[in-house]
Image: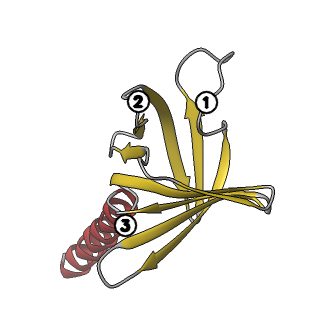
């Protein structure tokens, strides 16, 4: 009976630890509102005065708010250091982000967190919150 109780306790601890790990993965640094401050494409750097913002929600939905007030909606999913974005709308229009996987690089600064989204060597976005 005592051996069975030890086994059940060990099993419950394992389940709780794995659930806690899953919660941490879901509750990580990406969730929240980010300003998109710099965009790099083909060796051209574009800094903005009126920056678009993107809000990553924990429901795996993201809303991009352009300076004009227009919005774009995306589904997102992350795994490790990769972020997958998929536009939710008319596939025949130009969107701010392409349907693709982006590398994620987080850098903690003094007063903000910086996030670099890397599409490839020639295209990336610098976000801050």
Residue pushed farthest bottom?
Answer: 110
The picture places residue 16, in percent across and down from the top left corner, at 27, 67
Q: In which quarter of the image is residue 5?
A: bottom left
Q: Residues within 10 Å of mark 1 (few under 14, many from 20)?
A: some
Residue under circle 3? Answer: 18
Scheme by which the image is coloured: secondary structure
Q: Distance between the residues labelled 3 and 1?
A: 37 Å
Tag 3's secondary structure? helix
Q: Observer-nearest residue: 76 or 73? A: 73
Q: Are marks 2 and 1 in contact (CB under 8 Å)?
A: no
Q: Observer-nearest residue: 10 or 37? A: 37
Q: Distance between the residues labelled 2 and 1?
A: 14 Å
Residue under circle 1? Answer: 95
Residue under circle 2? Answer: 68
Tag 1's secondary structure? loop
The picture places residue 51, in percent across and down from the top left corner, at 43, 48
The picture places residue 79, in percent across and down from the top left corner, at 56, 57
The picture places residue 60, in percent across and down from the top left corner, at 41, 41
Q: How crowded is mark 3: few (under 14 residues within 10 Å), some or many (20 or more)?
A: few
Q: Looking at the image, is mark 2 or mark 1 earlier in the sequence?
A: 2
Q: Are marks 3 and 1 in contact (CB under 8 Å)?
A: no
Q: Quadrant of residue 73?
A: top left
From this view, report whether residue 106 is shown above or below residue 52: below
Quadrant of the image containing the C terminus: bottom left
Residue shown at 40%/37% (left/top)?
Answer: 67
Mark 3 or 1: the one toward you: 1
Q: Looking at the image, is mark 2 or mark 3 earlier in the sequence?
A: 3
Q: How far apart are marks 2 and 3 (CA)?
A: 44 Å
Q: Horizontal placement of 8 versus 21: left or right?
A: left
Residue shown at 67%/49% (left/top)?
Answer: 101
């Amino acid at each position: 009976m005592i051996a069975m109780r030890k086994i059940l306790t060990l099993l419950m601890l394992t389940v709780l630890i794995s659930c806690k790990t899953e919660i941490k993965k879901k509750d990580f640094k990406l969730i929240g509102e980010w300003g998109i401050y710099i965009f790099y494409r083909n060796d051209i750097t574009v800094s903005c005065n009126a920056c678009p913002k993107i809000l990553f929600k924990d429901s795996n939905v993201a809303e991009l708010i352009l300076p004009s007030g227009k919005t774009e909606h995306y589904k997102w999913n992350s795994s490790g250091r990769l972020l997958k974005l998929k536009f939710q709308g008319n596939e025949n229009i130009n969107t701010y982000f392409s349907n693709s996987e982006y590398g994620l690089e987080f850098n903690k600064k003094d007063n903000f967190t910086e996030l670099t989204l890397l599409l490839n060597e020639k295209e990336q976005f610098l976000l801050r919150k």
